[in-house]
Image: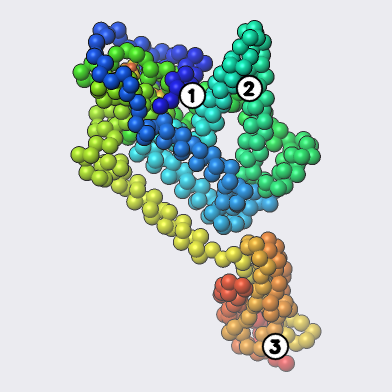
């Protein structure tokens, strides 16, 4: 059971915008209040409720949000130009795989919106989690001040309350901004900047700016952000269809007792009874619990439900086949799930094929060949090595298919430290007249330790047109 006082309905605009209706949404038509006999005035929500589930998920999300950058699970490290993703350290020159990874995450969120509506907003979004947390915090502080400073005047309690709320939110903002920026700057590096009060470098200025924005957001803006700044709610109107999960008021027997508890608990300050397609509704299910609590006292089921579309069956309807119960309700949805599986599998294969030590060999054709004083013909090549792992490595090079070839770089164990890049040029030479053709195909092979990953680079060796003799 949850308190009904946590809704910020007084802080939010009264006008309710809907997708299909004009913004100044009309109030529900007046109706005759039905008199239902109270059969169980002590009715309580069962242990399982959407509110409780949200609290658990919010706690898990908070811990995950804090821990992810510290364990390099995901971080776009701007100073180092690295992208850390589930244990892989991707370099900025691997932009394609970074891009496709981000596109995959975007695609998953989009598909989830099509199937399950705005569950991301209600259950997973950090903005919503911290907005609700700041409201709850404010209410607790208010209760505390009223209890322990009851003898003080109203204005003193008001000031005490404000000082306490803004102080706690200020400290929380520094912490949250620190975690947020840790997604872009290595946490230890960031901590050093924080304790030295760095507001000079780009990182320090960004940290100070994000702290102020975080404070303003959670102290004043809160859920207004969702309806004024965030585009996700508007996108939901495009992504959803008649089978998308919505929170829906269904009252064919006109049992509603007009208690308005469903409105009071709503953080977004709306009346779900007017339409299931209101752009403010984040599908959190708080109104479902509220109505269940009220109607339970009358021995009736809730009038507000999660349902698959406005006219679809209710969530949890055990009569529907399993695939319909999890949201697979038409060919479009099955196609989207199949695309996600194929996309995800391809991405996993791309990651597994990625070598932590990158070796690239390319010819330098600014000059085709050079005749040396030593009666040898020289061709120039470029070698790029990048150790994208966290352990030192070594690369061994060998030349195959080019008789009597000699190279100017060491072929044995070129050492490359963790995170190091080497870019160098080298020459390969053969005795003049040793090759009869102008263009000669051969391979440069590499083995990178400690993973013993092998690469083969097909190259051509250019000889002079005239046959050179010793
Ligand atoms: S109407 Fe219900 S589901 Fe929608 S935001 Fe308000 S409480 Fe949550
Ligand atoms: S909580 Fe239920 S009974 Fe009360 S006003 Fe809302 S829909 Fe009607």
Name the side, left or right, on which 301 lies relative to 289. Answer: left
Local crowd at mark 3 within 10 Å, few (<14), some, or many (≥20)?
Answer: many
- Name the image quarter holding residue 304: top left
Name the side, left or right, on which 198 lies relative to 288. Answer: right
Depth check, mark 1 against mark 3: the one in front is 1
Earlier-in-chain disc, 2 versus 3? 2
Image region (quadrant) for ligand 1: top left
Are dots 1 and 3 in contact, CB under 8 Å?
no
Image quadrant for the C terminus? bottom right
Q: Secondary structure at mark 1?
A: helix
- Residue appearing at x 37%, y 20% in the figure: 262
Earlier-in-chain disc, 1 versus 3? 1
Q: Give the alpha-carbon distance from disc 2 to disc 3, as whole Å.
A: 82 Å
Q: Secondary structure at mark 3?
A: strand
Image quadrant for the N terminus? top left
Colour mode?
rainbow
Residue linked to disc 3:
431
- Name the image quarter holding residue 86: bottom right
Image mark for residue 227: 1
Which residue occupies the foreground of this view, 467 or 21?
21
Kindly tell me whether residue 292 is visible in this rendering: yes
Percent position (x, y) of residue 461? 63, 79
Local crowd at mark 1 within 10 Å, few (<14), some, or many (≥20)?
Answer: some
């Amino acid at each position: 059971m949850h308190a009904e006082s946590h809704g910020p309905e007084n802080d939010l605009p009264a006008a309710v915008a809907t997708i299909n209706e004009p913004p100044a949404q009309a109030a529900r038509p007046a109706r005759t209040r039905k008199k239902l006999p109270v059969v169980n005035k002590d009715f309580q929500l069962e242990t399982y409720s959407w509110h409780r589930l949200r609290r658990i998920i919010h706690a898990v999300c908070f811990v995950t949000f804090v821990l992810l950058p510290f364990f390099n699970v995901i971080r776009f490290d701007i100073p180092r130009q690295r992208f850390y993703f589930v244990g892989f350290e991707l370099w900025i020159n691997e932009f394609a795989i970074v891009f496709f990874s981000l596109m995959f995450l975007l695609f998953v969120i989009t598909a989830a919106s099509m199937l399950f509506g705005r569950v991301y907003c209600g259950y997973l979004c950090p903005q919503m989690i911290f907005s609700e947390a700041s409201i709850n915090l404010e209410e607790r502080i208010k209760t505390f001040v009223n209890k322990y400073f009851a003898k003080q005047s109203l204005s003193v309690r008001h000031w005490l309350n404000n000082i306490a709320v803004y102080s706690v939110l200020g400290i929380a903002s520094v912490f949250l901004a620190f975690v947020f920026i840790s997604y872009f700057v290595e946490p230890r590096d960031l901590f050093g900047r924080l304790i030295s009060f760095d507001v000079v470098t780009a990182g320090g200025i960004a940290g100070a700016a994000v702290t102020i924005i975080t404070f303003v957001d959670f102290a004043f803006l809160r859920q207004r952000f969702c309806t004024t700044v965030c585009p996700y709610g508007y996108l939901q109107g495009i992504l959803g269809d008649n089978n998308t999960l919505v929170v829906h008021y269904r009252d064919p027997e006109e049992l509603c007792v007009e208690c308005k508890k469903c409105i009071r608990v709503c953080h977004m300050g709306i009346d779900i009874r007017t339409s299931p397609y209101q752009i403010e509704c984040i599908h959190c299910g708080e109104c479902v619990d509220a109505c269940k609590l009220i109607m339970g006292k009358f021995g009736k089921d809730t009038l507000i439900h999660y349902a698959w579309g406005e006219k679809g069956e209710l969530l949890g309807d055990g009569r529907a086949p399993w695939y319909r119960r999890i949201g697979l309700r038409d060919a479009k949805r099955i196609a989207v799930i199949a695309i996600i599986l194929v996309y995800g599998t391809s991405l996993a294969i791309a990651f597994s094929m990625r070598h932590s030590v990158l070796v690239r060999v390319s010819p330098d054709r600014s000059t085709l060949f050079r005749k040396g004083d030593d009666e040898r013909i020289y061709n120039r090549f470029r070698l790029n090595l990048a150790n994208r792992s966290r352990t030192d490595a070594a690369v061994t090079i060998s030349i195959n298919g080019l008789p009597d070839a000699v190279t100017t770089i060491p072929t044995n164990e070129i050492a490359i430290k963790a995170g190091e890049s080497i870019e160098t040029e080298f020459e390969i030479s053969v005795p003049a007249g040793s090759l009869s053709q102008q263009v000669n195909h051969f391979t440069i092979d590499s083995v990178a330790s400690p993973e013993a990953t092998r690469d083969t680079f097909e190259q051509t060796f250019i000889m002079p047109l005239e046959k050179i003799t010793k």
